[in-house]
Image (cartoon, coloured by chain):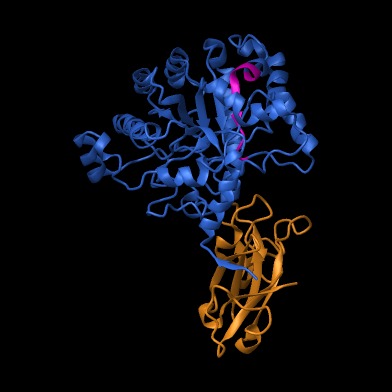
Chain colours: A orange, B blue
Amino acid sequence: MARHVIAPVDELPPGTRKFLEIDGRPIAVFNIKGEYFGLMNRCPHQGAALCEGPLIGLAQSSDPGEIEYTKLGEIIRCPWHGWEFDIRTGQSYCDPRRFRVKAYPAHVEPGTSVVKGPYVAETVTVKVESDYVVVEL
Amino acid sequence: MNIQFRESLEAASSLTAKNATKTAIADCDIHPARASRTELYPYLAKRWQHHLEVYGVHAYQGMMDGPPYPKAQPNASRRDAYPPEGGPQGSSLSFMQKQLLDPNNVQLGVLNPLNSGQGIRNHELSAALCSAINDWQIDKWTSKDKRLKGSIVVGNEDGLSAAAEIRERAGDKNFVQVLLLSRNVEPLGQRRYWPIYQAAEEAGLPVGVHAFGFGGNPITPSGWPSYYVEEMVGHSQCQQSALASLALEGVFERFPKLKMVMIEAGFGWAPSLAWRLDNVWQRLRSEVPHVKRPPSEYIREQVWWTTQPMEDPERREDLFDVINWIGWDRLLFATDYPHWDYDEPSRVLPAGVSEDNREAFYLGNAKKLYGIS
């Protein structure tokens, strides 16, 4: 599993996302309340750029008339057909048996570690004093 | 390690560039939009421009100037379909070319403008707006991209002015069909609409019936439902009423060369509707002696169906059973671009279809019906 440096932490504040292509694969990395998640930017249903959709919450109902709205900002809604996926896991809420978005682990590493070895970003100016968001795939 | 930062749209277009060798298709339901409220003014007499400014537009549904239900996405459209130059989704030819026509190798694209002057209480205004929309289709779309063909929009509640508009446009190669909507003041087989069918038959143009409309009736026969989801499934119920009316009022019998296209209301219901019609017709034919043959025969001979929203049963065999009844020569592929429930051409048809049927489904049927060589 290769690690790819995405951006300095400052460039990806909470609530934002960054689109990129790694090894020909369209990826988006999200910062949800300080946690980082990577998703394949392609809806498994009909292939739309899934991660361009709005971030919403999860509306659930135990009984008709009772509505619970949770996971605010953690659900991505496809820009075409509105299929909902959990950003943390790639799990579909429409058809969890058959559809899942490929999720990639993302986390923060100190600059001193990402400049070493093979993990040097080519298109980001790496400042050793910063922390960097790293995605694995 | 190779990291590239790209705007996602550029990534999409680099993917679609690879698709330039895709098999050609027809897209029989594309929705062009106006970039602004006043974009039609150059095609409207001053009298109607002033009328719009002073009085606005009043539809039969009353107290509403938009669709009766909120839509799932802004303008009921894909969120990635906003043109880069601004304006609503579907309002830019160059972006439509880049996002839909080029990457999918669309050889024939049929335009179905919505919110275009149909179902308005003031019939003179309705006729003027429809005529303006037709001029606008030529100026902004069909004259600029020969793949695109327009639908003649008519003031549907006034059969005589609608027929006049059809006769005015007859023979104009910019247009390939007449457009009606499914929600009308009365079921579509009724006599007030007959002049439309007569003029279309004379002009050799199919009549498309697209879901939606502003006729004032609820989408379901049991009243106004609570949710947009119900409206979405209501379109098929609405279309079934329209088709039953066309068959039982004798429209197909009276206009035997008339071709109807059921647009955006599904087709999985067609066999069962036809079976029920035949069943009751056999018992009650004396009530409708003008219907001389089993209704299913007219339907099989005179009706075509666009695919979007494509039926999607769990077992593909179920889909094939339905299509085998309808006929592989009767389906017209459509995406519904730029609307949110868009069907992606490469994803809608399951494997297991013969090459001939695939070709008919994606292109051949449409070229034949619409007379495109």
Q: Residue at x 68, y 82 (%)?
A: A117
Q: Is residue A51 left or right of residue B164?
A: right
**Residue B222 visible, this orientation:** no
Relative height, residue B6 to residue B140 (above, below): below
Q: Can I make out residue A132 in this image?
A: yes
Quarter occupied by residue B345? top right
Label total for image:
0
Q: Please give the name of the residue rendered at 66% of the width and 85% of the height, measured from the top-left corner.
A: A116
Q: In which quarter of the image is residue A90?
A: bottom right
Left or right: where B180 falls relative to B285? left
* Residue located at (71% from left, 14% from top): B282
- Residue B113 x, y percent position in the rendering: 43, 37
Q: Is residue B307 magenta?
A: yes
Residue drawn at the location 29% of the way across and 29% of the way down: B124
Front residue (pair A131, B210): A131
| Nearer the observer, B76 or B140 | B140
Across and down, in percent, residue A69 comes to 62, 70
Q: Is residue B16 magenta?
A: no
- Asked if B141 appears above or below B164 in the picture, the reply is below
The percent position of residue B65, horizontal first and vertical second, equals 38, 46
Query: What is the quadrant of the N terminus of chain B in the image?
Result: bottom right
To which quarter of the image does residue B231 belong? top right
Which percent across, then down, holds residue B183?
50, 34
Specify the segment rendered in magenta: B299-309
Between residues B250 and B372, which one lies in front from this camera angle? B372
